[in-house]
Image: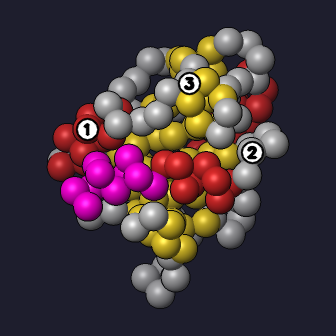
Amino acid sequence: MRAATVLLALLTLAGCGTVQVDPPTPQGEAVAACDKLAGLLPGTLDGDERGTSTPESPYVAVWGEGTIALRCGVGRPARMAPTDQLREIGGVGWFADPDRPTLFTAVTDTAYVEITVGGEHVAAEVLADLSEPIARMAGR
């Protein structure tokens, strides 16, 4: 439910300059991994410039008018079963939420990274562009 609220906030505030995104609270080794990821993220993603979010958090990144949002250090997706197959893109396993077609989670040993892709963006392209920094975060 929280991811749906995040997406709704993103879509509601699109075009307002600053996007409201609920920041996660990473724990343990995810804190260092997410701090590392923050410095690896691109300034432009799928043609959109990186924007700002509120409240400010090193664990959140948005691009464009908020139709692409990243949250690092989220919990394991509730819908992800141990037997689910992950889609591998650029060395990173991605879980696609079956109930929310715009929500994807990168699964690494150190942190879960949630991506919401809305608007006119092609999810596969966004995930491919984010796979490299996420793989580097995870030490691959």
Report the amino acid beneath label 1.
Answer: Lys
The earlier-in-sequence mark between 2 and 3 is 3
Q: Position of residue 80 (x, y in %)?
A: 51, 72
Asked whether 5 falls inside the magenta stretch, the response is: no
99 vs 87: above or below: above
Q: Quadrant of the C terminus?
A: bottom left
16 vs 83: above or below: above
**Mark 2 nearby-residue class (10 Å; few <14, some 14–19, many ≥20):** some
Part of the protein shown in magenta:
131-140
110 vs 85: above or below: above
Identify the residue at horizontal 79%, vertical 40% (top origin): 119
Identify the residue at horizontal 65%, vertical 40% (top origin): 46
**Mark 1 nearby-residue class (10 Å; few <14, some 14–19, many ≥20):** some
Residue, disc 1:
36
112 vs 92: above or below: above
- The answer to which image quadrant residue 131 occupies is bottom left
Residue 121 numbered tag: 2
- The answer to which image quadrant residue 16 occupies is top right
Residue 65 numbered tag: none
- Evaluate if marks 1 and 3 touch, with contact meaning CB atoms under 8 Å apart: no
Relative placement, left or right, of 17 versus 30 is right
